[in-house]
Image: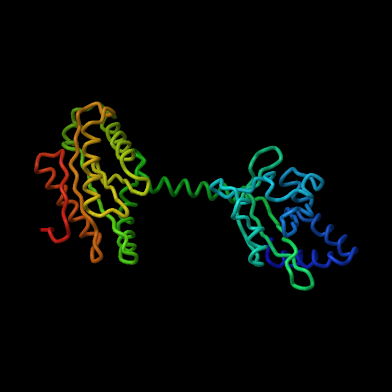
Amino acid sequence: MDANNLEISRQSALAAENQPAGLVFFKQLFDSLSDGVYIVDKERKILYWNRGAQALTGYSQDEAAGRYCNSGVFNHTDGAGCKLCEGNCPLLKVIETQQPQYKRMFFRHKDRRCIAVAMHCMPLKNERDEIVGVVGMFRDASEAAALDDAYNKLRELSEKDALTGTTNRRQLDKIIPDQLRLLKRSGIPFSVILLDIDRFKQIKKTLCRGEGDEILVHFAQILRRQCRGSDIIGRFKEGMFLILLRQQNLELAVQMAERLRIAVSTSRQLRRNLTASLGVTEATFDDTTAGVMKRVTQALHRARTCGGNRVESLEPETVA
């Protein structure tokens, strides 16, 4: 429902406050709408519930009127499943701010299924311009919610490596520049680890079909178990992974790399005794993406040339 319709509905409700004939018109107007409409007082007690609200939720006027919106009957939640009535209720925000609110949310239908709705909330005021309640208007947004969900899944797939489920190379190429901009704005440090499975190309030639992919999947699982939730793990290429450690300086990043090295070399999940070489560097204020990648690649090369199964790090001033 657009802003004009909301304003008409609000004025109709105000007219009904002092005029019995206005109340009849107000009910007829709202009951003619396919959108759900309900009115609550300042305590969020439901005073009115139209036919559209009944059609969308399964609850009749008699079942809804007199209940409190935050009683848990309708179980209003956001897209993440968080209950809105416990602190982020749009009706409550209207009462507190006296400003209209819009929110995409979910109602629990009488038959227990969840329905996606688009909710518009407007303040109701008396002749003294005092807020006396809120009118909420909602319509079925299931198709829009399904479209959003499909888009989010598609976006997630476009950002993930199909085999390992880690961040793909295309997305990694965007993340480091983003983190450098954040570092320059806020001073929040980050470090990068580049991990390579030792002699993976040679080992892969001796494996049966599919076993090389299985090793990569297991490696990704090992990395996820060792890293924090805020760390970004991505498949850089072939048997190589890049890990971006937010809010970690070089010293902490080297410690993490050593834990990863040990976890790989001692893992019972891998059928073969595999090891990994790891290069580590920390980004600085005047860094570029190319500079960070050059250092971490050189650090990895040192680890390889020293026999593998090793961690090497480079600071900015040590770049050749």
- 164 displayed left or right of 290: right
| Picture quadrant of residue 283 | bottom left
Where's residue 57, x and y in %?
A: 71, 45
Residue at 76% across / 51% down in the picture? 52
Of residues 179 and 142, the one drawn nearer to the viewer in this rendering:
179
Of residues 181 and 91, the one drawn nearer to the viewer in this rendering:
91
- 235 displayed left or right of 56: left
| Picture quadrant of residue 123 | bottom right
Colour treatment of the image? rainbow
Residue at 84% across / 58% down in the picture? 28
Residue at 23% across / 56% down in the picture? 282
Where's residue 172, x and y in %?
A: 31, 52
Of residues 237 and 306, the one drawn nearer to the viewer in this rendering:
306
| Picture quadrant of residue 9 | bottom right
- How many numbered marks, from 0 up? 0
- 270 displayed left or right of 137: left
Of residues 48 and 209, the one drawn nearer to the viewer in this rendering:
48
Where's residue 162, x and y in %?
A: 36, 40
Where's residue 62, x and y in %?
A: 82, 46
Residue at 18% across / 56% down in the picture? 294
- Assign the N terminus to one quadrant of the image: bottom right
- Assign the C terminus to one quadrant of the image: bottom left
- 163 displayed left or right of 254: right
